[in-house]
Structures are given as C-alpha cells and as structure tokens.
Amino acid sequence: MRLSRRRLTVYCVAFLFAIVMNFAVPRLMPGSPVDSMIAQLGPRATPAAIEAIKARFGAIEQPIWQQFVDYVVGLAHFDLGVSVKYYPQTVLEVLGRSAGWTAFLVVTAITFSLCIGVLLGAVAAWRRGGRFDSFVSPFSVVLIAVPPVIIALATLFTFGVTLRLLPVGYAYDPSLDPGLNFTFFGSVFLHAIMPVLTLSPYLIGEFQTTMRSSMISVLGEDYVTMGRAKGLSEAAVMFGYAARNAMLPVLTNLALMLGAVFGGSIVTEIVFNYPGLGLTLYTASVARDYPVIQGQLLLMTIATLGANLLVDIIYGVVDPRIREGRA
Amino acid sequence: MNAGVSLFWRQKKAVAGLVIILTLCLMALLAPVLAPGDPSERVGRSHQPPTVEHVFGTTKMGRDVFSQFVWGARPSLAVGFATGLAITALGTIVGLVAGYFGGRTDATLDLATNAVLVIPNIPLLILLASFAGTVGPMAIMAIIALTSWPWGARMTRSQTMALRQREFVVAARMVGEPHWRVIFVEILPNLVPLIGINVVGSIIYAIVAQTTLEYLGFGDPLRVTWGTMLYNAQNSSAIIVGAWWDIAVPAAGIALVGLGLALINFTFDEIANPQLRSGPALSRWLRLTRLRRRELEAAR
C-alpha cells in the first residue's frame, strides 16, 4: 500500500510539532517548573532525581541544540522521563497502566455512536425534509454544541445518584480481582455504561451531520438514479448503493475528531473517576507532574496520527478511484 | 445578500436561536440591575435549596447561585464570543492567503494547517495551561485561538481556490488590480456565508473548550464564570450531597448558549449550502413513487 507523500509529511510535521512544543514550553514559560517539581518530590528528592529533572527541563549548562538532541534521542528509546507524583515510576509505566481503559472507553463509544449516527444520517438524508429529518438533524447539531462536562454531570446525577441504577466511579467493582471471568466482565460492562453514554452524544451528532450531508450529495449521483431505475428496493439502493459510498467522509471526520474525543474522555473520566489517561492527566495537572502531562500529549498525538494513517489506508482500499489511480 | 437575510428570518429555528442568545446577552449586560451586589458575597447558609429569597439556591460557601449565574454570564459569553471571532479571523486569513496565492505559500500554509489539525487540541491546551499555571481569560483566549484555527482555514482555502478561477476574479487581476483589492473586494464578499458558519462554529467550540479548561481548574478560581461555578460545585461534591441546583444552573446556562448557537448554525449551513436544505424535491419524488406503487397494486 503506497501512501501519498504529502500525507506522510503532514504527520511527520505534526509529530515534530508536538515534540518541539514539549521541549520548548517548559523552557519558555515564566516561573520555574523545575523548582516546583523538586518541591513536589519532597523527601524523595535524591540528588539523582534532581539531576534527572534538571536535565530534562533545561536547567543545566548546555547549548540548547545539545539539549534538544538528547531529548529526541531519549524519546527514541521510549524514555519519557520519570513521574514526579509517582516517583520512582517512569512516565511510561504510569501512562501504560491507564491507556488500556481509555482505549476501551473511546473505541466502545466510537463503535456505538458510529452505528447509530450513520444510520440516523442515512435515513434523514433519504427522507430529506420529512418529519424524521426535521427533528433529528437540528437535534444532532445541538448535541455537538453541548460540552461533555454537562452531559457527564447530568448522566451522573440522573442514573448514578438519583436513580441509583448504575455504579458511580472506577472501572470495576474494587472488591473484585481482575480476572478472566464473567463476574469481572459484567462489572466492567456496568461501570462503562455511563462513561460511554456520556461520550456518545457528541459523536452521534457529528456522525449524523456528516453522514447526512455526504449522503445528500451521493443521492444526486447517476449510479443511485440507475439503481432506482433498475427497480431495486428502497433499502437496496439506500444501503447497497448510497450509504456505502457516503461513509467515506464520515471516516475522515472520525480520524480528525479523535482529538476532541480524547478531550471528552478526559472530562468523562474525571467525573466518573474512571482510571484512564484522562484521570491520570488530571491528577498530574493538579500535582504539577509535568513529565506525565508531556508524555500524555505525545501519546495522544501518536494515537491521533495513527488513526489518521489508518483511515488513509482504509480509504485507499475502499475507494476504487484511489485504488485504481495508484495501480 | 438580501435574499439570505429574508431566508434567515423565515427560519423559525434561527429566530429561536437568536432569541436565546440575545436574552442571555441582555441578562449579562443588565447584571447590576438583576442581581445587585457582589456575587462572591456570603448571603445565606451552605447549600440552601431554591427559595423565594434565593431563586436558584446557594452554593456550599453560602453564595447566591442566581447572582453568580447572572454575573458569570459576562466573562463566559465575552471570552466565548471574542475567542470565536479570533479563531475565525486567524482561519480566514490563513485560508485566504493560501488559497489565493497558491504555489509555495499554499504548500507551506496547508502543511501547517493539516499538522495543527491532527494534533489533539484539548491535551495540547492542558499542556499549555498547566505550564502557564492559573491563567486569566486573555491567556485562555490566546491558547484556544492558537490551537483551533485549522478547521476554518481548510474550508476558506478550498472555497478561495474555487473562486480564484472564476471570471470576475481573473478579470480583476487582468485589469491590474492590486492583490489586496482582489482579495478584499472580489473574493471576501463571496465568503460571507462561510465566515458566518465559521464564526458560530468557533464560538461553540470556544465555549466548550473554555468550560472544559475552567472545569479542570485552570481558570482563575476567584473570578465568577460558569466554568468556575461548575469547578467549585464539583469540588464541594454538590452532586453527591444532592445540591443539584449548584451544578444544574451553570450547566443550563452553557447548554442554552450551545442550543442557541446550534440553531443559528443549522440555518447558516442551509443558506450557504442549498443542497443541504430540506428541499421538497426528493420528498415529492418519494410521494410519486409511493402513489405509483399503490396504483400498480390496485391494478393487480
């Protein structure tokens, strides 16, 4: 599979940008992050730890380019530094603990919303101007505009506190031992319902809106008219001819939205005390644990770039115009 | 343009949205009349439920929620609108320059646009905000604007590229008009609907981002805004103790702004892109086929 060189350049520049941001921001900001971090460490501040933090945040006598080269070489060896809050654990260990939960949450929410949003969008476009369309489409735009904080708090209050239907907080019942059994999976499932329901409205709104507009333009294509002229059933034309092709812009949008989804998951995890990357980021930001915050940005950038790359590849496989053009 | 304005007024959704936004703005402007006194003043017991005296109840610190809501609307709306305008201005300039000049300028700007677009915004915002410490509204504005212009830039760029090929633009250039004149007089007026969508969308985004940052505790905790109200309510575990008014009031304010803007944006979208309009053509076609099928069945 050959990817366009332009897209790859974009990803490289974006990645480089994230690295430069991580390197430059602590050196440019007023105030001294190094001092506050050493203060954070308290009695654990051994000379070795202080030295490591100083080297990482530029409080040493070394030309800036030398520092940058050292920083990049460190990253290439997966050295993201040492956490201040959880010293002596490394950032990679801290993030590794929680990344799985966020991935689980985000992937579940995306899959769930993709199914619903695409279906709603396709039907709304098919019956454009009908009762369904004139209710669902403006509603989706509203869903996009409501911050996840508010949806999270409303869900928590309704289902967690007032009705006491669902467990509040954490990813599974703390009295259970994580293991491959039904009780544990059931607990994980129950604890994931509210966070997933919180992440979904925004995604459903976005998918519905994108799907509707892309479906409307596809419905004007000759092959759709052809399908109708052949006398195929409505469902066959709608899903077999139109919706399949209208899905492509939804995929592009999905990859670009991933940043916003991570943003939503940060808030959701904080509200529901879900042990994912967002909660780790929050505790890190409260404790001014800068290495963890930086590692977080890199990890999320890599995830977003990876998703975009994946979409590019899927595009190449699915869209015959691109596939044939390359052959 | 006139057709656009009358179309706007005929849309019930847009008018409803406009009414919501204007009411909230009016409330913010009239804050000294509606809720005289300092919103941070202690006026009652802790977490008092809504009464006649305190319509929206009190916070954990015994502050009047209604007064905080009214005063908090000022910075929340002002920062949201100003940031939205800043995002749009940045995006429009980058998109116009890239689309109009093309060549190497375009290649560089397009690369930058796409690169900033794929970097996750909120984590970047949190990185910047946490190094800056507690940040005032100006810093929040700058951080949000600098990380979220690419959407608008991409839309403006592709539209400008299409316009550049049109006869009237080519003619203006042939006559020897300077670049700035071609851009501002010939191209910009044609981008107005797009800029409208961009402004409303950016304001929505700015308000979401601002709320998120303040909720996470990056705002100035002493300033009364809807975001810091949520932050304080969360920190005093208002939900768990059942003080729903403490959370619901600022949440409703933010949700109302979102609703109003969304309704306006939906209409803007339809004006700019007639294809999206809930046009009668397709439904007429569907009705016809349904009729025909019924006739066929009846004939059988």
Image (tube, grey):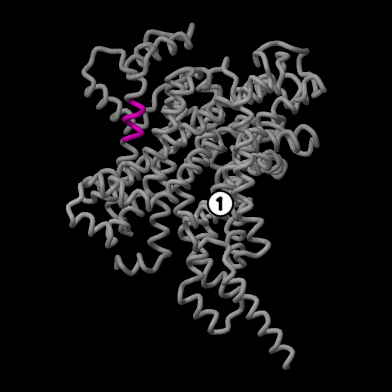
Position above or below: A15 against B8: above
Query: Mostly what secondary structure, the magenta segment?
Result: helix
The reply, left or right, for residue A58 in relation to residue A141 is left
Of all residues shown, which one is farthest toward the bottom?
B300
Question: In this orientation, does residue B53 appear?
Answer: yes
Residue A234 lies in the magenta stretch: no
Q: Quadrant of residue A3?
A: bottom left
Which residues, given as a range, are shown in magenta? A17-23
- Chain bearing mark 1: B
Residue at 43% in and 32% down: B124
Q: At which x and y percent is residue A43?
A: 48, 6
Left or right for A92, reference B170: right
Observer-nearest residue: B187 or A260?
Answer: B187
SS at badge 1: helix
Find residue A208 and report its horizontal and vertical position in percent. 57, 55
B91 with respect to B263 (left or right): left
Name the amino acid, label 1.
Phe
Task: Give the residue number, with chain letter if any, for mark 1.
Answer: B266
| Circle 1 crowding by C-alpha within 10 Å: few under 14, some 14–19, many from 20 | many
Q: Nearer the viewer, residue A109 or B67?
A: B67
Question: Image quarter for residue B52?
Answer: top right
Name the residue nearer the viewer: A63 or B293.
Answer: B293
* Residue A241 place in picture, x, y as percent: 52, 72
